[in-house]
Protein backbone atom coordinates (compact mmCIF):
# COMPACT_ATOMS: atom_id res chain seq x y z
CA UNK A 1 0.00 0.00 0.00
CA UNK A 2 1.23 3.48 -0.86
CA UNK A 3 1.98 5.67 2.19
CA UNK A 4 -0.50 8.50 2.80
CA UNK A 5 0.93 12.00 2.49
CA UNK A 6 -0.48 15.50 2.63
CA UNK A 7 0.87 18.14 0.26
CA UNK A 8 -0.38 21.37 1.86
CA UNK A 9 1.15 24.04 -0.45
CA UNK A 10 0.90 24.56 -4.20
CA UNK A 11 3.52 22.50 -6.07
CA UNK A 12 4.12 22.18 -9.84
CA UNK A 13 1.97 19.55 -11.61
CA UNK A 14 4.95 17.43 -12.73
CA UNK A 15 6.19 17.10 -9.15
CA UNK A 16 2.75 16.32 -7.78
CA UNK A 17 2.52 13.56 -10.38
CA UNK A 18 5.92 12.23 -9.27
CA UNK A 19 4.90 12.12 -5.63
CA UNK A 20 1.68 10.32 -6.63
CA UNK A 21 3.71 7.51 -8.26
CA UNK A 22 4.82 6.31 -4.81
CA UNK A 23 2.39 7.97 -2.37
CA UNK A 24 -1.34 8.35 -1.88
CA UNK A 25 -1.69 12.15 -1.87
CA UNK A 26 -4.20 14.52 -0.30
CA UNK A 27 -3.54 17.89 -1.90
CA UNK A 28 -4.38 21.36 -0.62
CA UNK A 29 -3.00 24.32 -2.57
CA UNK A 30 -2.96 26.10 0.79
CA UNK A 31 -4.24 25.62 4.30
CA UNK A 32 -7.25 27.78 5.15
CA UNK A 33 -9.86 27.98 7.91
CA UNK A 34 -12.22 26.16 5.52
CA UNK A 35 -10.03 23.06 5.06
CA UNK A 36 -8.46 23.05 8.56
CA UNK A 37 -10.68 20.37 10.10
CA UNK A 38 -10.37 18.11 7.04
CA UNK A 39 -6.56 18.59 7.14
CA UNK A 40 -6.46 17.65 10.84
CA UNK A 41 -8.49 14.50 10.11
CA UNK A 42 -6.14 13.50 7.25
CA UNK A 43 -3.16 14.13 9.53
CA UNK A 44 -4.17 11.27 11.83
CA UNK A 45 -3.34 8.82 9.00
CA UNK A 46 -0.52 10.72 7.24
CA UNK A 47 3.04 9.35 7.10
CA UNK A 48 4.43 12.46 5.44
CA UNK A 49 3.62 16.14 4.96
CA UNK A 50 5.15 18.48 2.38
CA UNK A 51 4.73 22.23 2.08
CA UNK A 52 5.86 25.53 3.56
CA UNK A 53 5.01 27.17 6.84
CA UNK A 54 3.08 24.53 8.81
CA UNK A 55 3.94 24.88 12.49
CA UNK A 56 5.04 21.47 13.74
CA UNK A 57 5.59 20.94 17.45
CA UNK A 58 4.61 18.41 20.10
CA UNK A 59 0.94 19.46 20.09
CA UNK A 60 0.62 18.78 16.35
CA UNK A 61 2.73 15.62 16.49
CA UNK A 62 0.37 14.17 19.13
CA UNK A 63 -2.37 14.35 16.49
CA UNK A 64 -0.20 12.70 13.82
CA UNK A 65 0.78 9.31 15.26
CA UNK A 66 1.89 7.80 11.92
CA UNK A 67 3.99 10.75 10.73
CA UNK A 68 7.60 9.90 9.82
CA UNK A 69 8.71 12.88 7.68
CA UNK A 70 8.03 16.62 7.48
CA UNK A 71 9.39 18.02 4.22
CA UNK A 72 9.66 21.84 4.21
CA UNK A 73 9.77 23.60 0.83
CA UNK A 74 11.92 26.31 2.46
CA UNK A 75 15.47 26.55 3.74
CA UNK A 76 14.43 28.37 6.94
CA UNK A 77 12.78 26.00 9.39
CA UNK A 78 11.70 28.23 12.27
CA UNK A 79 8.20 26.73 11.76
CA UNK A 80 9.51 23.40 13.08
CA UNK A 81 10.38 22.58 16.69
CA UNK A 82 13.20 20.22 15.80
CA UNK A 83 13.65 18.92 19.36
CA UNK A 84 10.00 17.73 19.39
CA UNK A 85 10.30 16.13 15.95
CA UNK A 86 13.48 14.30 16.93
CA UNK A 87 11.97 13.10 20.22
CA UNK A 88 9.02 11.69 18.27
CA UNK A 89 11.36 10.04 15.72
CA UNK A 90 10.10 12.24 12.87
CA UNK A 91 12.58 13.28 10.18
CA UNK A 92 12.59 16.94 9.12
CA UNK A 93 14.01 18.15 5.80
CA UNK A 94 14.50 21.54 4.13
CA UNK A 95 15.69 22.97 0.78
CA UNK A 96 19.15 24.57 1.20
CA UNK A 97 21.55 25.69 -1.57
CA UNK A 98 19.21 25.54 -4.61
CA UNK A 99 17.86 29.01 -3.77
CA UNK A 100 21.10 30.82 -2.85
CA UNK A 101 21.66 32.64 -6.15
CA UNK A 102 18.07 33.79 -6.46
CA UNK A 103 17.90 35.07 -2.88
CA UNK A 104 21.24 36.84 -3.31
CA UNK A 105 19.89 38.53 -6.45
CA UNK A 106 16.89 39.72 -4.42
CA UNK A 107 19.21 41.13 -1.74
CA UNK A 108 21.20 43.01 -4.41
CA UNK A 109 17.97 44.43 -5.83
CA UNK A 110 17.00 45.77 -2.38
CA UNK A 111 20.48 47.21 -1.84
CA UNK A 112 20.35 49.02 -5.21
CA UNK A 113 16.72 50.10 -4.81
CA UNK A 114 17.26 51.65 -1.37
CA UNK A 115 20.57 53.41 -2.01
CA UNK A 116 19.63 54.65 -5.50
CA UNK A 117 15.99 55.44 -4.49
CA UNK A 118 14.68 53.44 -7.45
CA UNK A 119 11.06 53.03 -6.29
CA UNK A 120 10.68 56.62 -5.08
CA UNK A 121 12.05 57.98 -8.38
CA UNK A 122 9.93 55.59 -10.44
CA UNK A 123 6.88 57.04 -8.65
CA UNK A 124 8.08 60.57 -9.36
CA UNK A 125 8.31 59.87 -13.09
CA UNK A 126 5.02 57.95 -13.34
CA UNK A 127 3.10 60.59 -11.37
CA UNK A 128 4.11 63.25 -13.91
CA UNK A 129 6.30 65.13 -11.43
CA UNK A 130 9.50 64.96 -13.47
CA UNK A 131 9.44 68.54 -14.68
CA UNK A 132 13.14 69.38 -14.94
CA UNK A 133 16.58 67.87 -14.35
CA UNK A 134 16.64 66.53 -10.83
CA UNK A 135 18.72 68.28 -8.20
CA UNK A 136 20.50 66.84 -5.22
CA UNK A 137 17.50 66.39 -2.91
CA UNK A 138 16.65 63.46 -5.19
CA UNK A 139 20.13 62.00 -5.57
CA UNK A 140 20.90 58.67 -3.97
CA UNK A 141 24.08 57.12 -2.60
CA UNK A 142 26.64 54.87 -4.25
CA UNK A 143 26.73 51.11 -3.82
CA UNK A 144 30.05 50.34 -5.51
CA UNK A 145 33.21 50.56 -3.37
CA UNK A 146 31.13 50.85 -0.16
CA UNK A 147 31.24 48.57 2.90
CA UNK A 148 28.73 45.73 3.05
CA UNK A 149 28.17 44.18 6.48
CA UNK A 150 26.60 40.71 6.35
CA UNK A 151 25.08 39.37 9.57
CA UNK A 152 24.85 35.60 9.07
CA UNK A 153 27.60 34.56 6.63
CA UNK A 154 26.07 31.22 5.64
CA UNK A 155 25.10 29.92 2.19
CA UNK A 156 23.00 32.95 1.18
CA UNK A 157 25.34 35.44 2.89
CA UNK A 158 28.33 34.08 0.94
CA UNK A 159 26.41 34.33 -2.31
CA UNK A 160 25.61 37.99 -1.63
CA UNK A 161 29.30 38.57 -0.80
CA UNK A 162 30.28 37.05 -4.16
CA UNK A 163 28.12 39.55 -6.07
CA UNK A 164 29.04 42.53 -3.92
CA UNK A 165 32.81 41.91 -3.91
CA UNK A 166 33.15 40.68 -7.49
CA UNK A 167 30.61 42.89 -9.26
CA UNK A 168 30.41 46.03 -7.14
CA UNK A 169 33.92 46.20 -5.64
CA UNK A 170 32.39 46.34 -2.17
CA UNK A 171 34.43 45.66 0.96
CA UNK A 172 32.85 42.82 2.91
CA UNK A 173 32.51 42.77 6.71
CA UNK A 174 30.65 39.97 8.41
CA UNK A 175 29.36 38.77 11.74
CA UNK A 176 28.56 35.10 12.21
CA UNK A 177 28.36 32.41 14.90
CA UNK A 178 31.82 31.27 13.80
CA UNK A 179 34.58 32.39 11.42
CA UNK A 180 33.94 31.64 7.73
CA UNK A 181 37.39 30.94 6.26
CA UNK A 182 35.99 30.42 2.76
CA UNK A 183 34.44 33.92 2.70
CA UNK A 184 37.61 35.44 4.16
CA UNK A 185 39.87 33.79 1.59
CA UNK A 186 37.57 34.09 -1.44
CA UNK A 187 35.92 37.48 -0.95
CA UNK A 188 38.39 39.13 1.42
CA UNK A 189 35.66 39.28 4.07
CA UNK A 190 36.66 40.61 7.50
CA UNK A 191 35.14 39.14 10.67
CA UNK A 192 33.75 41.77 13.12
CA UNK A 193 31.73 41.95 16.29
CA UNK A 194 28.10 42.92 15.64
CA UNK A 195 28.70 46.43 17.00
CA UNK A 196 31.77 46.98 14.80
CA UNK A 197 29.88 45.80 11.74
CA UNK A 198 26.97 48.16 12.47
CA UNK A 199 29.27 51.14 13.08
CA UNK A 200 31.32 50.67 9.91
CA UNK A 201 28.93 49.38 7.22
CA UNK A 202 27.20 51.41 4.49
CA UNK A 203 24.87 48.48 3.88
CA UNK A 204 23.81 46.07 6.64
CA UNK A 205 22.28 42.86 5.32
CA UNK A 206 20.64 40.48 7.81
CA UNK A 207 20.68 36.80 6.77
CA UNK A 208 20.57 34.70 9.94
CA UNK A 209 17.94 32.05 10.64
CA UNK A 210 15.23 33.02 13.14
CA UNK A 211 16.11 31.46 16.51
CA UNK A 212 15.76 32.43 20.18
CA UNK A 213 19.12 34.25 19.85
CA UNK A 214 18.21 36.21 16.71
CA UNK A 215 14.68 37.26 17.75
CA UNK A 216 14.71 41.11 17.72
CA UNK A 217 18.47 41.00 17.04
CA UNK A 218 18.14 44.45 15.44
CA UNK A 219 16.65 46.84 18.01
CA UNK A 220 16.92 50.52 18.97
CA UNK A 221 20.47 50.14 20.31
CA UNK A 222 21.66 48.46 17.09
CA UNK A 223 20.06 50.99 14.72
CA UNK A 224 21.66 53.83 16.74
CA UNK A 225 25.08 52.36 16.02
CA UNK A 226 24.53 52.49 12.24
CA UNK A 227 25.68 55.41 10.07
CA UNK A 228 23.04 57.98 9.09
CA UNK A 229 23.90 57.16 5.46
CA UNK A 230 23.61 53.40 5.88
CA UNK A 231 20.79 51.20 4.62
CA UNK A 232 19.36 48.17 6.39
CA UNK A 233 18.28 45.11 4.37
CA UNK A 234 16.34 42.21 5.91
CA UNK A 235 16.27 38.88 4.04
CA UNK A 236 16.04 36.60 7.08
CA UNK A 237 12.70 36.57 8.92
CA UNK A 238 10.63 39.54 10.11
CA UNK A 239 10.94 38.56 13.76
CA UNK A 240 14.70 39.21 13.75
CA UNK A 241 13.87 42.95 13.76
CA UNK A 242 12.12 45.12 16.33
CA UNK A 243 9.93 46.94 13.79
CA UNK A 244 9.00 49.77 16.20
CA UNK A 245 12.70 50.50 16.62
CA UNK A 246 13.25 50.37 12.85
CA UNK A 247 10.40 52.85 12.26
CA UNK A 248 11.88 55.19 14.86
CA UNK A 249 15.37 54.93 13.35
CA UNK A 250 13.97 55.79 9.90
CA UNK A 251 11.80 58.65 11.20
CA UNK A 252 14.65 60.17 13.17
CA UNK A 253 17.15 59.88 10.33
CA UNK A 254 19.38 57.48 12.26
CA UNK A 255 19.59 55.41 9.07
CA UNK A 256 19.06 56.33 5.42
CA UNK A 257 16.63 53.64 4.23
CA UNK A 258 15.46 50.05 4.64
CA UNK A 259 14.80 47.22 2.18
CA UNK A 260 12.54 44.52 3.58
CA UNK A 261 11.54 41.17 2.10
CA UNK A 262 10.15 39.88 5.41
CA UNK A 263 7.89 41.19 8.20
CA UNK A 264 6.85 40.16 11.70
CA UNK A 265 3.30 39.65 10.45
CA UNK A 266 2.92 38.27 6.91
CA UNK A 267 1.15 39.35 4.80
CA UNK A 268 2.05 42.72 6.34
CA UNK A 269 -1.13 44.65 7.26
CA UNK A 270 -1.99 47.36 4.69
CA UNK A 271 -1.96 50.09 7.37
CA UNK A 272 1.50 49.20 8.71
CA UNK A 273 3.54 52.41 9.26
CA UNK A 274 6.53 50.99 7.34
CA UNK A 275 4.40 50.97 4.18
CA UNK A 276 3.91 54.74 4.33
CA UNK A 277 7.63 55.58 4.34
CA UNK A 278 9.29 56.75 1.12
CA UNK A 279 12.66 55.43 2.21
CA UNK A 280 11.40 51.88 2.75
CA UNK A 281 11.35 49.43 -0.16
CA UNK A 282 9.20 46.38 0.48
CA UNK A 283 8.79 42.97 -1.10
CA UNK A 284 6.20 40.29 -0.22
CA UNK A 285 8.67 37.60 1.01
CA UNK A 286 9.75 36.64 -2.51
CA UNK A 287 13.49 36.20 -1.94
CA UNK A 288 13.49 32.82 -3.67
CA UNK A 289 10.39 33.31 -5.81
CA UNK A 290 11.41 32.79 -9.42
CA UNK A 291 9.71 30.06 -11.44
CA UNK A 292 13.01 28.19 -11.85
CA UNK A 293 14.10 28.31 -8.22
CA UNK A 294 10.70 27.55 -6.71
CA UNK A 295 10.57 24.50 -9.01
CA UNK A 296 14.01 23.37 -7.80
CA UNK A 297 12.94 23.84 -4.17
CA UNK A 298 9.75 21.81 -4.69
CA UNK A 299 11.76 19.13 -6.50
CA UNK A 300 14.22 18.85 -3.62
CA UNK A 301 11.33 18.74 -1.14
CA UNK A 302 9.72 15.94 -3.18
CA UNK A 303 13.04 14.03 -3.31
CA UNK A 304 13.33 14.39 0.47
CA UNK A 305 9.79 13.11 1.03
CA UNK A 306 10.05 10.15 -1.35
CA UNK A 307 13.50 9.04 -0.10
CA UNK A 308 12.46 9.31 3.56
CA UNK A 309 9.29 7.27 3.05
CA UNK A 310 11.13 4.54 1.19
CA UNK A 311 13.66 4.18 4.02
CA UNK A 312 16.53 5.89 2.17
CA UNK A 313 18.51 8.84 3.49
CA UNK A 314 16.92 12.07 2.19
CA UNK A 315 19.28 14.48 0.36
CA UNK A 316 18.94 17.37 2.87
CA UNK A 317 17.84 16.24 6.33
CA UNK A 318 17.75 18.65 9.29
CA UNK A 319 17.79 15.98 12.02
CA UNK A 320 19.52 12.95 10.39
CA UNK A 321 20.14 11.47 13.85
CA UNK A 322 16.54 10.20 13.74
CA UNK A 323 17.74 7.55 11.28
CA UNK A 324 20.86 6.47 13.18
N1 LIG B 1 13.66 36.02 2.26
C1 LIG B 1 13.67 34.79 1.76
O1 LIG B 1 12.92 34.42 0.88
C2 LIG B 1 14.69 33.83 2.29
C3 LIG B 1 15.26 32.88 1.43
C4 LIG B 1 16.25 32.03 1.93
C5 LIG B 1 16.63 32.12 3.26
N2 LIG B 1 16.01 33.02 4.07
C6 LIG B 1 16.41 33.12 5.48
O2 LIG B 1 17.81 33.19 5.54
C7 LIG B 1 18.29 32.28 6.51
C8 LIG B 1 19.69 31.85 6.15
O3 LIG B 1 19.69 30.94 5.07
P1 LIG B 1 21.04 30.16 4.69
O4 LIG B 1 20.70 29.10 3.74
O5 LIG B 1 22.11 31.14 4.35
O6 LIG B 1 21.37 29.49 6.10
P2 LIG B 1 22.80 29.09 6.68
O7 LIG B 1 22.52 28.19 7.84
O8 LIG B 1 23.68 28.61 5.59
O9 LIG B 1 23.39 30.48 7.20
C9 LIG B 1 22.95 31.14 8.34
C10 LIG B 1 24.17 31.74 9.03
O10 LIG B 1 23.70 32.52 10.13
C11 LIG B 1 24.64 32.33 11.20
N3 LIG B 1 24.00 32.64 12.48
C12 LIG B 1 23.06 31.92 13.15
N4 LIG B 1 22.75 32.53 14.30
C13 LIG B 1 23.51 33.65 14.36
C14 LIG B 1 23.65 34.68 15.31
N5 LIG B 1 22.93 34.67 16.45
N6 LIG B 1 24.52 35.67 15.06
C15 LIG B 1 25.28 35.66 13.93
N7 LIG B 1 25.19 34.71 12.98
C16 LIG B 1 24.30 33.71 13.21
C17 LIG B 1 25.09 30.88 11.08
O11 LIG B 1 26.34 30.71 11.71
C18 LIG B 1 25.14 30.69 9.57
O12 LIG B 1 26.43 30.92 9.07
C19 LIG B 1 17.24 31.16 6.52
O13 LIG B 1 17.22 30.48 7.75
C20 LIG B 1 15.95 31.91 6.27
O14 LIG B 1 15.38 32.33 7.49
C21 LIG B 1 15.05 33.86 3.61
O1 LIG C 1 13.36 30.04 4.01
C1 LIG C 1 13.06 30.11 2.81
O2 LIG C 1 13.32 29.19 2.00
C2 LIG C 1 12.41 31.33 2.27
O3 LIG C 1 12.10 32.24 3.25
C3 LIG C 1 11.21 31.02 1.43
O4 LIG C 1 10.11 30.87 2.23
Image (cartoon, helix red, strand yellow):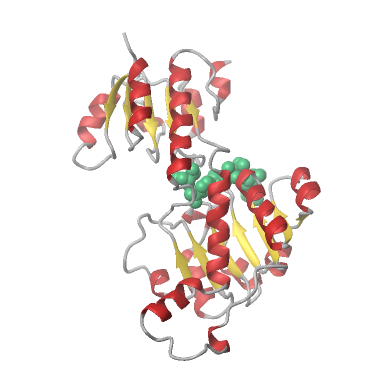
Q: Is residue 156 above or below residue 136?
A: above
Q: Check the picture and name the quadrant holding the N terminus.
A: top left
231 or 167: nearer the eye?
167
Residue 276 percent coordinates (x, y): 39, 74
Q: Is residue 50 above or below residue 4?
A: below
290 horizontally vs 21: left or right: right
Identity of the residue drawn at 20% across and 31% down: 38
Q: Is residue 314 above or below residue 122?
A: above
Identity of the residue drawn at 57% across and 66% down: 112
Residue 163 percent coordinates (x, y): 66, 54
286 horizontally vs 23: left or right: right
Q: Is residue 300 above or below residue 202?
A: above
187 or 276: nearer the eye?
187
Residue 222 percent coordinates (x, y): 62, 66
Is residue 80 at least partly visible in the picture? no
144 or 50: nearer the eye?
144
Furthest residue in direction left, as rendered: 34
Identity of the residue drawn at 78% across and 44% down: 181
Q: Check the picture and name the quadrant holding the C terminus.
A: top right
Identity of the residue drawn at 36% across and 15% down: 22
Residue 6 percent coordinates (x, y): 32, 27
Is residue 104 at least partly visible in the picture? yes
Total tally of numbered discs in the picture: 0
Furthest residue in direction front, as rendered: 132
167 or 186: nearer the eye?
167
Amino acid sequence: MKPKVIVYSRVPEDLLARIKETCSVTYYEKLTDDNHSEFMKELTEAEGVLGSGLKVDKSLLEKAPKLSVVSNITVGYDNLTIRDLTECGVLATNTPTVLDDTVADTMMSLILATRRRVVELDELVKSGNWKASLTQEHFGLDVHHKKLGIIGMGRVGQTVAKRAAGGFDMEILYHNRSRNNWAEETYGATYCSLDELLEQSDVVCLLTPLTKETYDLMGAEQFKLMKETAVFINGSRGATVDEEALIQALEEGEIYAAGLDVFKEEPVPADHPLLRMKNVVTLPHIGSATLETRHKMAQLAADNLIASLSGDNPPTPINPEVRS
